[in-house]
Image (spheres, helix red, strand yellow):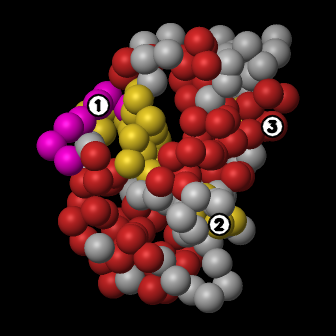
Amino acid sequence: MQDFTQEGKSRSNEHEAKFMAALCRYLILQGYEREQITVLTAYVGQLTQLKKELVPKDFFVGVRVCAVDNFQGEENDIILLSLVRSNEEGKIGFLQIENRVCVALSRAKKGFFCIGNISLLEAKSTLWSKIIKDMRASGNVGKALTLTCQNHPQKVSHASCADDFKTWAPEGGYTL
């Protein structure tokens, strides 16, 4: 579930922020340059939460953390998108604004990872419903991210929370 931050009642989601920080760390440990990675969100509250989770700070120097509105016209190799919205009221806020959705989904050159409550988005937005249908058809939707060891391809794990990365790949690779 999402939380409200103290600053101006913006939205944040601690689970998503922790997951994105762990995924970002994992990608860096896989050999991706920090400058190749941008973490995006539609909410200033989540931006604050993400910056809190990207520790130690010196490890993540070069990774851009940005609000979707401030990333128009830009792109990067890898985009990590935190959607934030997950609530019992069924409200999707900024995520119903088509140009924000377009910017958020079209900035990646090589890799795109998105975390959020797609059931809520699918139910509340025709645009998101179409996007998610296409993603499902190509096998790009799931409850966890599949991790496979490049040296032991038979070793597969699924990350659905930040701790899953620490357990399976504490230094970036499978524990063997």
Res. 92 in view = yes
Kindly identify the residue that appears in the image at 28 percent across and 62 percent down: 100
Kindly identify the residue that appears in the image at 71 percent across and 52 percent down: 15
Q: Is residue 113 above or below residue 42?
A: above
Q: Quadrant location of residue 132? A: bottom left
Q: Earlier in the sequence, mark 1 or mark 3?
A: 1
Kindly identify the residue that appears in the image at 55 percent across and 78 percent down: 120
Q: Give the residue type that dot 2 points to.
A: Phe
Distance CA(mark 1)–CA(mark 3): 26 Å
Helix, strand, or loop for circle 1?
Answer: strand
> Residue 163 shows which numbered tag?
3
Q: Give the residue type that dot 1 points to.
A: Asn
Magenta span covers which residues?
72-78
State the quadrant of the N terminus. bottom right
Kindly identify the residue that appears in the image at 42 percent across and 58 percent down: 42
Q: Which residue is mark 1?
A: 76
Q: Is residue 154 above or below residue 48?
A: above
153 in the magenta segment: no
Marker count (numbered):
3
Q: Quadrant location of residue 103? A: bottom left
